[in-house]
Image: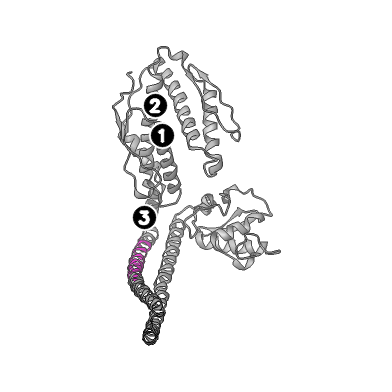
Amino acid sequence: MTSHPTDQVLSPPELPPYLNSVKELKPIIGTPNNDQLIAILSIIRAAQKVAEIPGMGDPVLVFRLSEHLFDAQMARYRSKYLATTFPENTTYTPPALPAHVPVQLERVVGTPSEEEVMRVQDAVRLYHQFSKIPSMFDSHTNMELTQYLFDVQMARHMQRARQTHVPKPISRANVTRTVEQAADPIKDLDASATNNPGTGARVAELAQSTLDARLSDSIERSNRLAERANELTERANLLIERSNVIAERSNQLVEKSSQPAEQSNKHTDRFNQLFERLNRHLEGSAQLAKESTKPVEKLGEVLVNINKVLVRIQHAIIRNHKGNTLRALDCLVNEKGETPAMSDMTDNVTFADFFTGPEHLLSVVVDGTFQEASIYDSFLGQFLRFYGLGDALFESASSTELSSGNEENARSRLREYLSSCLG
């Protein structure tokens, strides 16, 4: 096998605008540098977070990004190790890990053992858990650790390739098709809904048509309000400019007021007239400025309504899925588009994280039947705030602490809401 050519170009997949704002991926010529690998890993993390929201992610894009990462890591591996004359003497040095990662990695000489590879996998998995805490997660360390895992796995692969025959090649088209199907649970959900005559298909079509109509109407109204606000703002700016001109002329008249007495009276009268006009213009500009805020307020109300419609449609799609279990609770988004696992409000805790106990039970109607979920009393306030429920049950308007004695009321309110979403 030859070394990696220095002029080979690795082209990334085309990114949607919301990922281009995270990092810009450019074609890689030759061996990738650290910044290029960090950029690919950052884009993959962002794409995976979006894919966690039902109906929002693009599993094909995640797959293509993973392929691009593999190609880049392979290029690094080739440039560093394939030129080695005696592979059995090759040394693989791990990166230095921070103290909060409880895994000790040591240098590997020759072919890594299964235990050594498993130890690196544990380190990668543990370190990725800190990706939501910026102070405990370093992109450069993550890049080095990910590349180190690739290197030791590739070393074992090369050893096996030298010892065994080359297996029959697997069709790349079949692999791609299998990955795309496994990575797109939303398409499976839609297909399941379509296979239930008279239920899933009609609900999905009705939800989509209702959403399209409401979105089109709301966006058109928003555009008209924004245009009106711009017109009022321009008129206000013109009046303010004219007021500034009048004020400058008034200052000039004040300076001339020290001239002979017979002219001072005329100047004073003129000044008073200009000052009165200035007051009228200022009053008019203030009124226009006040009116210009009204379309903006209406625009905010329209956007809030659109957001509520989107949340309800997402809940309806999940509720329509046949065979739901308690895990569906962790798929419900709030009005910010977050699931419990994504939100700082819930400390990234999900319903699946609570241990079952008689004092923690939360009976929820899922798919027409009662099922027993669990939630600790200490998390009731955080989950009510997450879903925007029960404002009267808290100590204050901004607190997540429940008022004394309101735990049962909070549990009942949360039970009713979740049952309405999934029942």
User: Which of the two marks, 3 or 2, is nearer to us in this view?
Assistant: 2
Looking at this view, name the residue that lies furthest to the right: 404
What residue is disc 1 on? Answer: 37
Which of the two labelled residues, at mark 1 and mark 2, occupies the earlier sequence position? Answer: 1
Q: Is 253 on the left-hand or right-hand side of 342?
A: left
Label number found at residue 76 = 2
Q: How far apart are labels 1 and 3 at the CA level?
A: 41 Å
- Number of disc labels: 3
**Could you tell me which secondary element the residue under label 2 belongs to?**
helix
Give residue 282's position: percent from left, percent from top: 40, 78
CA gap, disc 1 and disc 2: 10 Å
Location of residue 271 in the rendering, given as x and y in whole percent from the top left corner: 39, 82
- Farthest residue, direction top: 86
Stretch in magenta: 205-227
Q: Quadrant of residue 249?
A: bottom left
Q: Are marks 1 and 2 in contact (CB under 8 Å)?
A: yes
The numbered disc on residue 194 is: 3
Q: Is residue 389 above or below residue 344?
A: below
Q: Is residue 174 above or below residue 75?
A: below
Instruction: Name which residue lies at 43% across and 40% down.
Output: 42
Q: Nearer the viewer, mark 1 or mark 3?
A: 1
Main SS category, magenta section: helix
Residue 219 within the segment the image draws in magenta: yes
* Mark 3, secondary structure of its residue: helix
* Image location (x, y in percent) of residue 340: 53, 52
Q: Going from the N terminus, do you reach mark 1 or mark 3 first? A: 1
Task: Please name the amino acid that badge 3 sits on.
Answer: Thr
- Please tell me how crowded label 2 is: few (under 14), some (14-19), or many (20+) other residues with Cα within 10 Å: many
The answer to whether 318 is drawn above or below residue 164 in the figure is below
